Image (spheres, helix red, strand yellow):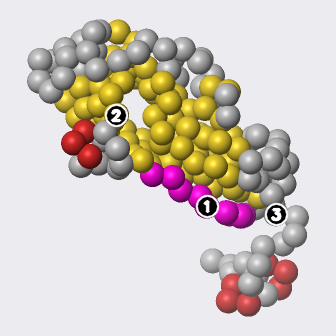
Amino acid sequence: MAIIKPNNNTISAITALPASITTGKVLQVVQGTHASEDNFGNTSFQASETDVDITPSATSSKVLVTVSFTLYMATMNDEYVVTLYRDSTNLATNAASGFGTIKLDSAAKYGSNVSFQFLDSPNSTSQLHYEMYIKRDSGSGNAILNFNTNATSTITAIEIGA
């Protein structure tokens, strides 16, 4: 088998990729946490206080947002939808369906650990506010975020340079 030598260099001599290969760079990482117990039962989206602010350094930057949380439900057939807002804009492709549904379809109480992520292209150098929102889609009970304050919801915004 032949050994390939990029630009006639040994592998150990290569310290960087050629300029023609574009790679993203992590420019900043900002995290927000929320440890208070909150109840959700409205059929329209409610702010969760799981939020973070980030100011991109270039309009070409992307922002990767990751959200992790625990949602506790006690009422059978309750269904909750979570979504992500940037400022006042719901970022889900289908705003009503959000980024996913959590459903309790048994009589047992249920605590669900959930995470989701979204790669945003905000085209902005202004401060951006990202926040998770929750609504009840069906059923009649309440869901509890950070039940008994034994959990902390987190949201992380990572600016990726072009």
Q: Position of residue 20 (x, y in %)?
A: 88, 64
Q: Is residue 52 above or below residue 89?
A: below
**Mark 3 belongs to which amino acid?**
Ile
Task: Say which element carries label 2.
Answer: strand
Indicate whether residue 70 is drawn in magenta: no
Q: Position of residue 77 (x, y in %)?
A: 24, 12
Question: Which residue lies under the disc numbered 1?
Answer: 29
Query: Which residue is found at the position 36% from the left and 24% from the top?
Result: 40
Task: Say which element carries label 1.
Answer: strand
Q: Residues within 10 Å of mark 1 (few under 14, many from 20)?
A: some
Q: Earlier in the sequence, mark 1 or mark 3?
A: 3
Q: Is residue 31 left or right of residue 63?
A: left
Which is in the foreground here, disc 1 or disc 3? 1
**Mark 1 belongs to which amino acid?**
Val
Q: Is residue 78 left or right of residue 15?
A: left
The foreground one among 65 and 146 is: 146
Which is in the foreground here, disc 2 or disc 1? 2
**Marks 3 and 2 close (CB-CB < 8 Å):** no
Indicate whether residue 28 is drawn in magenta: yes
**Mark 2 belongs to which amino acid?**
Asp
Toward the left, the furthest residue is 108
| Residue 13 can be seen in this image | yes
Question: Which residue lies under the disc numbered 2?
Answer: 38
Which is in the foreground here, disc 3 or disc 2? 2
Instruction: Identify the magenta region.
Output: 25-33
Q: CA distance from mark 3 to mark 2?
A: 47 Å
Q: Earlier in the sequence, mark 3 or mark 2?
A: 3
